[in-house]
Image: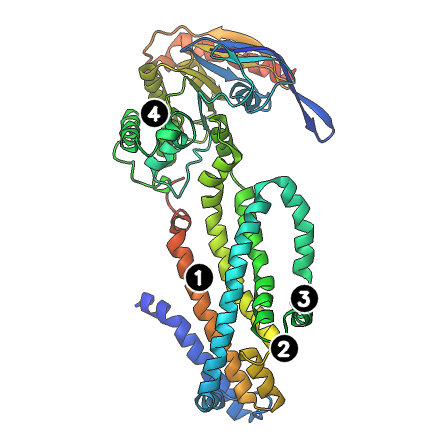
Amino acid sequence: MNKQIESAAPWLFVVGLFVFWELACRLLSVPTIILPAPSAIFAAFQRFGGPIATNSFVTLWTTMAGFALSVVFGLILGLVVGWSRTIYRSFYPVMIGFNSIPKVAVVPILVMWFGIGEVPAILTAFLISFFPIVVNVATGLATIEPELEDVLRALGASKLDVMRKVGIPRSMPYFFGSLKVAITLAFVGTVVSETIAANKGIGFLMAQAGSNFQMPLVFAGLIALAIEGIVMYAATAWLEQRMTGWAFRSQGSAAA
Amino acid sequence: MIELKDISLAYAGRTGPVLALDGTSISVGKGEFAAVVGPSGCGKSTLMKLVTGLIKPTSGNVSVDGAPVHGPVKIAGMAFQNANLLPWRTVTENILLPLEIVEPYRSQFRAKKAEYRARVENLLEIVGLQGFGDRFPWELSGGMQQRASLCRSLIHEPKLLMLDEPFAALDAFTREELWCVLRDVWQRLNFTVVLVTHDLREAVFLADTIHVMSARPGRIIETRKVNFARPRDLDVCYEKDFTDTVQVLRHKIAEVRKA
C-alpha cells in the first residue's frame, strides 16, 4: 500500500498543484493577462495544438543536436583535462571564465555569424551544457585511487593503460550523472536563443504570444517545455541506470 | 632477491626538502618472507615504491632479482590496506586485470582467456573464495575483498609480493584467518614477500626476518630472525618465545618513537 502511494505521489502532487492553481485563480479572480488558470492554458493547448506541436518539435531537435555536440565535445575535453594535472590547471581558469559568461550575451554574436534560425539555438544549447560534462568526466579521471595506479604502474602499465582499464570506466558514473544536468541546461540554451532570434521553436512561439498578450498560450509553451524537459531527463536517468548500474548497486551494500 | 644499499630519498615538501629515508640498507633473500615494522611515517611505504621501481632513490642502489632497478620491475605483485577492486568488474575480471597489462600475458590475453580463467579459479580456491568468481566486489565482505586483492597480486605469478598493511582494516578474527591464508599461499607458491605492517604479532607470526625502522628519516635499526618452525600454527602466538619476541620489538619501536 505504501509502495503504491509512493509511486503515485509525483502524479498526485502535479494534479494537486494544478487544482490549487485553478482554485487560486478563480477565488482571487486573477486576470488572465497576469496569470491564466490551468483551464485556460489547456484550452490554449487545444486551440493551438498544431503550432505548439510543430514548434515543440523544433525545440526538441535543436536541443538534442546541441546536447549531442556537448556530449561529444564534453567527453573529449573532459578526458583531455582529466589526463594530467598540468592540462587540468592550464585549462581550468579559461573554462570557468567561459562558463561564467551569460549565454544570452553570446546569442547576438552567434546570430551575426550564422544568421537567425536553428544554428544559434543549437550552439547556445551546446555552449551552456558542455561544462558540467567536462567537469564531471575530468573529476572521475583525476580521482583514481593512487594505490591502484601504483599496482598497475608497477606492472609496467602506461598512462593509456591506466586510463583505459580504470580511469574511463571509473568516470562513467560521473559522465552519465552530468548528462542529467546537461540536458536540462541544453533546453534553457535553446529557448533563450529562440526567444531572442528565431522564427521557429517554443521560445519563438512564447515571445510571439507574449507580444500579442496571449498569456494562456505563453503558459502552454512553458508547460510544453517542462514536459519535454522531464521526458528527456527521465531518458538520460534511465540511460545512466542502464550503463552504470554498478555504481548505484555498490552504494549501501553490506560489504565494508 | 632484493638489495637496497645506502638508500637516501628526499622529496620536495612544503618547507623545503624532506628526507624520508637516510642510509637505508636491506637485503631480502629469494623466497624469504621479510617484514618491515616501524612507527608511522617512517617511510615504509616509500620503501615499497622504491623496490617496485615506482620512484628513484636520491642516492644509493636498488636491485631486484639480480638487476638494478631503473623503472617498474614488472615481476612484483602489490596489495594494500584497501582492496581497491574495480566495482564494475566481477571478482574474476578483477583478478585478471594484471594479465591485461603485463607481458607476456597481455599479448596472449584473448587467445588464452579460458586458461587464465582456470588459473583464477585455482587461486580463488587456494584463498578460500571458490565459487565467488562471478560476484561483484561490493557483494563481498572486507575479508573476502582482501582475499580477492591477494589473488590479483598473485595472478601473474610474481616472484615478489609487496604488501602494505594489507590486513590493517580487518577485524581481529578475519585478520588471523588471512594470516593463515597468506602463510599457506606463500608456502605453496614460494615467492619472496615484503610485508609492511604496524602489527608486531602479524610480523612475528608470518616472517622469517623482521626489519625495524627508525622514525623519519627512516633507517633500518635492527634486523631480527624469527626461527619458529614451519608450518606455523596460530597457537604459536601464545608461546612464551613468541610473546617475548613481540615484547622486544615493541620496546625497540617505543624507543625510536621517543628519539
Q: Between disc 3 and disc 1, whose residue precedes?
A: 3
Q: Distance between the residues labelled 3 and 2?
A: 16 Å
Q: Which one is nearer the viewer's eye here, A63 or B47?
A: A63
Chain for mark 1?
A: A
Q: How far apart are marks 4 and 1 (CA)?
A: 45 Å
Q: Is mark 2 on a helix, strand or loop?
A: loop
Task: State the residue position of label 4.
Answer: B177
Q: Residue A153 at what x, y percent from top left?
A: 50, 29
Amino acid type, residue under disc 4 in the picture? Glu
Chain for mark 4?
A: B
Q: How far apart are marks 4 and 2 (CA)?
A: 71 Å
The nearer-to-camera label among 1 and 2 is: 2
Q: Between disc 3 and disc 2, whose residue precedes?
A: 3
The nearer-to-camera label among 3 and 2 is: 2
Task: State the residue position of label 1.
Answer: A236
Q: Between disc 1 and disc 2, whose residue precedes?
A: 2
Specify few, some or many for label 4: CA neighbours under 10 Å numbering under 14, 14-19, or 20 or more: few
Chain for mark 3?
A: A
| In this view, B90 is above or below B184 | below
Q: What element carries label 3?
A: loop
Point out the residue furthest to the front here. Answer: A114
Specify few, some or many for label 3: CA neighbours under 10 Å numbering under 14, 14-19, or 20 or more: few
Q: Residue B8 at what x, y percent from top left?
A: 64, 15
Task: State the residue position of label 2.
Answer: A197
Chain for mark 2?
A: A
The nearer-to-camera label among 4 and 1 is: 1
- Are circles 1 and 2 on residues that touch, CB within 8 Å? no
